[in-house]
Amino acid sequence: MDNVDSLIIENKNPKPTHNEYQIVFLIAFIGFLASTDSMLLMPLSNIIMAKYDVSAQVSTWVISTYSIFAGIAGFLSASIMDRFDRKYLLIGTFLGFSITTLLCGFANNFGLFVFYRGITGIFGGVVGGVGVAIVSDLIPFDRRATAMSIISLSFAVSAIIGVPIGIHFASEYNLSVPFKILAFISFLTLIPIFLWLPKIDKHIKEHIEHTSPFKTIKLAVKDSNQVLALLLSILIVFSHFVVLQFIVPYMENNVGFSSKLVPVMYFIGGICAIATAPFIGKLSDRKGNFPSFILLMILSFVPIILSTHIRVVSMPLALFICATFFILAAGRMIPAYTIMSGATTPEKRGGFMSMRSACMELGTALASIVSGFVVKIGADGLVHHFNYVGYISVATGLICIFIASKIKIVSHE
């Protein structure tokens, strides 16, 4: 596979029912919208604190509320994920996501805004799991890392396009405008979802047992392999977002970034992540996901430590460090996602992916809360103790390597 077109799987059926290349990019675009929605508020920490006159600790609850609700919803939906055609499950949850994102655009006070963010998280937490389950069902395991690399680009593209545009509108107008725009685009995206996705119901069995959410979770907990994969999903996201939560205030207040440079930082970092993600995906397919994961995780420690310790330096150097952080932090997710996707069988994959998505949201919430307690913004406006979150991120990364080594691949479908 030398290019993206290789994602189109040869089908011996003279009338193929779907184009997997098209579907992978549709799921990636949905991920772009969801990523932009969940990421947007992190670089706006200074604006949120100033507008609502809240502390750094209080401001983190805007993000953690979304993630906590998303995590809870992901777990509670796990028992129904494998009962329905994934196409219509995606349509329903994405419609809910679109409506609640629009509501965020009409919130007129901090409390209501936080509340609507939580409701949006309920749908956002399920959408991610459904999307990854769809790709996992359609793309064979031996080529899935390449597909996952395309999906992972949603984070990078949101950093290049979504977040900078959102920052611009939030800065020039107010916080409501980016969410109204996101909602409008999301409603339009429902059309190709309906038209392009085929029925995805092979996982459905005729006499499936309808279990409660808690029984589904209990069954998953009994499977040590699934537990390890879910724990990995929590910790790898935690390792990333514990740094990302206050990186913008640190760059602005301590390093000397102009607020105008923040979109540039995300743009450059996202471009670099996009350029390298397909290469990382192919490397993981050819060399093995676990060896690739170890290499990328260890390499990511360098920009993590540098970005949490730099002082007043030249802007090109600071941007280079941030770009490297984006490349490696996003890149290590590619083999990690593929390892997780093989930790369970196809008939259980929908519920598992829902719980995996929930765990990732909980990892984000935990990172936001921990960074809020560790990092302090002094009377001088400087961000203090940011270096500590770098140490926490590296230590968590080492634990991730150990956990990944214990996960068994039980499905190559």
Image (cartoon, rainbow, N blue to C red):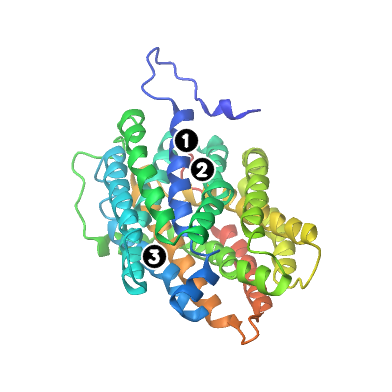
Task: Report whether 253 appears left or right of 26.
Answer: right
Q: Residue furthest bottom?
A: 379
> Residue 146 placed where, x, y %?
57, 38
> Residue 39 placed where, x, y %?
50, 58
Is any atom of residue 94 visible in this view? yes
> Residue 66 shows which numbered tag?
3
Q: Residues within 10 Å of mark 2 (few under 14, many from 20)?
A: many
> Residue 295 shows which numbered tag?
none
What is the secondary structure assignment of the residue under circle 2?
helix
What is the secondary structure assignment of the residue under circle 1?
helix
Q: Amino acid at mark 3?
A: Tyr
Task: Report whether 348 appears left or right of 88.
Answer: right
Q: Up-down: is 295 above or below 27?
A: below
Q: Are marks 2 and 1 in contact (CB under 8 Å)?
A: yes
373 or 16: nearer the viewer: 373
Q: Up-down: is 57 above or below 296?
A: below
Task: Report whether 230 appears left or right of 125.
Answer: right
> Residue 151 shows which numbered tag?
2
Q: Are marks 3 and 1 in contact (CB under 8 Å)?
A: no
The image quarter containing residue 137 is top left
Q: Amino acid at mark 2?
A: Ile
Which badge, 3 or 2, comes first in the chain's sequence? 3
Q: Are marks 3 and 2 in contact (CB under 8 Å)?
A: no
Q: Amino acid at mark 1?
A: Val
Q: CA distance from mark 3 to mark 2?
A: 21 Å
| Quadrant location of the N terminus in the rendered image | top right
Task: Report whether 188 appears left or right of 374.
Answer: left
In this rendering, which labeled residue sits more in front, label 3 or label 2?
Answer: 3
